[in-house]
Image (cartoon, grey):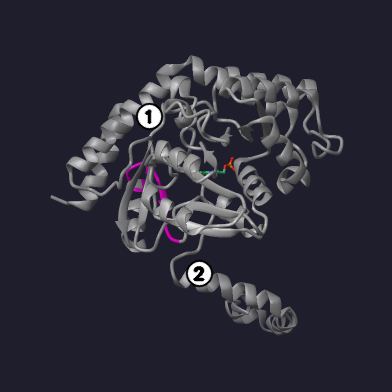
């Protein structure tokens, strides 16, 4: 309807025709109204390409354009073809999958591993697979959408505890009685806050209450731990974590994901994870590039070191100026501005200065905490990070 009203007068007859058409399609009005409502609230999402110096993407180690990884992937695509041809259970189980899963499990030190076509699907599959009507799922208030969407597919009972708060988790665990499975699902590093989860405390609670612990290492793998093997490895919790997730689209610069655990857990997922069972497997070329990316990330430790050093440098400048970047301890540094308006303005000003940042607003983050999310990557130079910090400080505290 709106589109018709916008038409110039000379299209009179055509407009009447269109109005009739649109009235017939009232579902389109409903959808257009929903979008208009979002636009009115300043919440409309649209696709834009990063411009200038990009501080928004998750290519933390700068591996997305790494020649060795890209050429290994290209050769693998030519050798094995562009597609996997089917779900792993129906014609898509190439031997490359099993070889790589063996290699990845050995890298992580688990008995078994299962490749998914992305981290979102992995979380969807894992959470929904374990959450039947008797299961109690415990997750952080700031859990990633993929964990909550996995829950939405399930018939389990959800308990959300305060962010990074083991005492609140314990309170929730104490309230649950009965025989059902207790599943604690947490992230090692929170994607919009950049803070690190108290995993040791969670592991102790899991043990005390006989719960299963699942750790999503999407933003910690490649960065934290020995050789970038993640937070579970950094804290020596391998024997206390029952399942964990690595995604390859972030630090490893490629795509896909892998879930690690005992053979029992993996066999269960093969039989219950719907996003695994009912989806075409990722291509063998992408699988081969997972291994190559891990090899390169492990070997080129200067990338990880630079990310950690430069993020500490950036955070230091920002906090010295009294700016709120929450409890960030990693390469993800939130600049919390509160309102949509303030955040949008800061985003636009930085863009004018040549810096592209991620503008994050509710519902992705809690109300009143709209923010810029700055991701420090190995490809960023110290002078650029310094200029970015100066521009942010100037916007927030103009002299
Ligand atoms: C914590 C967390 N888990 C899972 C995912 C999904 O991973 P992928 O991008 O591979 O689908 C993301 C991606 O944003 C994430 O931040």
Name the residue: 61% across, 32% down: 260
Residue that appears at 65% across and 48% down: 130
The reply to whether discs 1 and 2 touch (Cβ–Cβ < 8 Å) is no
Measured along the vertical axis of the image, is residue 366 above or below residue 119? Answer: below
Q: Quadrant of ligand 1?
A: top right
Image coords of residue 208 (percent x, y)? 47, 42
In the picture, measured across the screen, residue 145 lies left or right of residue 318, that is: right
Is residue 140 depicted above or below 205 in this figure?
below
Magenta stretch bounds: 351-362
The residue carrying pointer 2 sits among few (fewer than 14), some (14 to 19) or many (20 or more) residues within 10 Å by Cα, namely few
Q: x%, y% of residue 11?
A: 66, 79
Mark 2 lies on residue: 38
Picture quadrant of residue 390: top left
Q: Disc number at residue 8?
A: none
Q: Which mark is residue 380?
A: 1
**Residue 316: x, y in percent?**
23, 36
Q: Residue at x 40, y 60 (%)?
A: 366
Residue reaching furthest top? 299
Residue 356 falls inside the magenta stretch: yes
Q: Which of these two is toward me, 219 or 253?
A: 219
Q: Residue at x 47, y 24 (%)?
A: 228
Residue 128 lies in the magenta-colored region: no
Of pointers 1 and 2, the one earlier in the residue sequence: 2
Q: Secondary structure at mark 1?
A: loop
Separation of residues labelled 1 and 2 (CA atoms)? 34 Å
Residue 280, by quadrant, is top right
Q: Is residue 364 visible?
A: no
- Which residue is at the far right? 91
- Residue 102 lies left or right of residue 60; in this view the side is right
Q: Is residue 219 above or below residue 10?
A: above
């Amino acid at each position: 309807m709106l589109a018709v009203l916008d038409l110039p007068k000379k299209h009179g007859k055509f407009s009447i025709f269109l109005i009739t058409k649109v009235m017939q399609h009232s579902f389109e009005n409903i959808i257009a109204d929903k979008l208009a409502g979002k636009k009115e609230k300043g919440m409309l999402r649209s696709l834009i390409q990063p411009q200038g110096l990009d501080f928004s993407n998750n290519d933390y180690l700068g591996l997305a354009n790494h020649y060795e990884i890209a050429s290994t992937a290209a050769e693998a695509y030519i050798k094995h073809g562009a597609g996997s041809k089917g779900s792993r259970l129906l014609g898509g189980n190439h031997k490359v999958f099993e070889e790589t899963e063996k290699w990845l499990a050995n890298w992580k030190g688990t008995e078994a591993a299962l490749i998914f076509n992305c981290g979102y699907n992995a979380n969807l599959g894992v959470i929904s697979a374990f959450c039947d009507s008797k299961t109690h799922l415990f997750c952080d208030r700031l859990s990633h959408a993929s964990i909550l969407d996995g829950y939405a597919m399930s018939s389990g009972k959800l308990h959300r505890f305060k962010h990074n708060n083991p005492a609140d988790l314990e309170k929730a665990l104490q309230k649950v009685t009965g025989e059902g499975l207790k599943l604690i699902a947490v992230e090692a590093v929170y994607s919009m806050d950049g803070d690190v989860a108290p995993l040791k405390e969670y592991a102790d609670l899991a043990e005390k209450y006989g719960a299963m612990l699942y750790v999503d290492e999407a933003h910690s793998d490649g960065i934290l731990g020995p050789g970038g093997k993640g937070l579970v490895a950094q804290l020596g919790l391998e024997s206390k974590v029952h399942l964990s997730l690595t995604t390859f689209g972030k630090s490893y610069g490629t795509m896909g994901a892998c879930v690690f655990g005992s053979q029992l857990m993996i066999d269960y997922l093969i039989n219950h994870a719907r996003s695994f069972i009912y989806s075409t497997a990722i291509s063998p070329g992408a699988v081969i590039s997972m291994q190559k990316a891990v090899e390169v990330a492990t070997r080129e430790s200067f990338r990880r070191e630079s990310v950690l050093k430069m993020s500490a440098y950036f955070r230091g400048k920002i906090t010295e100026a009294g700016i709120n970047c929450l409890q960030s301890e990693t390469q993800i540094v939130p600049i919390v501005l509160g309102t949509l308006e303030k955040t949008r303005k800061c985003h636009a000003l930085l863009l004018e200065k040549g810096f592209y940042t991620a503008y994050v607003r509710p519902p992705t983050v809690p109300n009143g905490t709209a923010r810029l999310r700055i991701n420090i990557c190995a490809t960023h130079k110290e002078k650029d990070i310094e200029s970015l910090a100066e521009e942010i400080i100037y916007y927030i505290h103009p002299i």
